[in-house]
Image: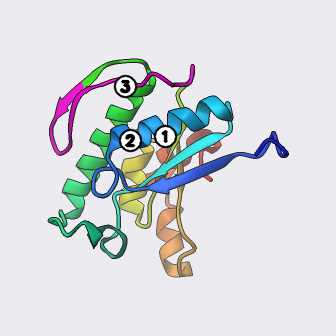
Amino acid sequence: MQAAPSLEFRIVNAPGQRYHPAIIAQAAGTLMEMFPHRFLLTVGSGQVMNEHITGTYWPCKSERNARLKECVEIMRALWAGETVTHHGLVSVEEAKLYTRPDYQPKIIGAAVTARTAEWLGSWADGLITILVHQRHSKKLSKPSIAVAVKENRCC
C-alpha cells in the first residue's frame, strides 16, 4: 500500500451477522490510521449464501436492513470517539476505540434492487451495485433513486 500512496481500497461486508460492528470499526479505524483518506467501507444487508455459516437465524430483508443501519450508526459513533453502549438488533457494551482516525470514512452501500438503492441513498455516502441484466438496470437508473446518486456518490 505504501508503494501506491493514492490508491484507495475497501472492504465489503454485512455487519451484524458474522462480523460485529465494533470489530469492523476497530479494524477499519486501524486501517484508516495507517492509510489516511484511502479507505472505503462498503456495507450491505447480506446474502444467505455468505452469512448462513454462523448457523443462526436468517432474518427477513427488512430486519437485515434495520440491523445494517443500526450497525453503521454504531460504527460512526465509535469513529467519532464516543463510548458506545447499545442494545437492539446487535448489542454493544461500553465499546471505545483507542486507535481511530480524525475523520469519518465513506460508507458505501451495496444494493441490487432499486428499492434498496433508494433506501441506502437516504443515509450512505455512496452506492455500489453489481452488473445486472439490462431490464433490471433500467429500474436502478430511475429518478426515484436520484438521492442515491446525488453529488456523484456512486462507485
Which residue corresponds to the image point at 54% horizontal and 69% vertical from the top-left? Answer: 130
Q: Amino acid at mark 3?
A: Ala
- Nearer the viewer's eye, disc 1 or disc 3? 1
- Residue 96 part of the magenta segment: yes
Give the image's coloring scheme: rainbow
Question: Closest to the observer: 100 or 67?
Answer: 100
Question: Closest to the observer: 54 or 119?
Answer: 54
Looking at the image, residue 66 lies above or below residue 151:
below
Which residue corresponds to the image point at 34% horizontal and 42% vertical from the top-left? Answer: 21
Q: Is residue 37 visible?
A: no
Residue position marked by numbered label 3 in the rendering: 77
Residue position marked by numbered label 1 in the rendering: 27
Real-space Cα separation, disc 3 to disc 2, in angstroms: 13 Å
Residue position marked by numbered label 2 in the rendering: 23
- Return the disc, 1 or 3, that comes first in the chain's sequence: 1
Looking at the image, residue 51 lies above or below residue 44:
below
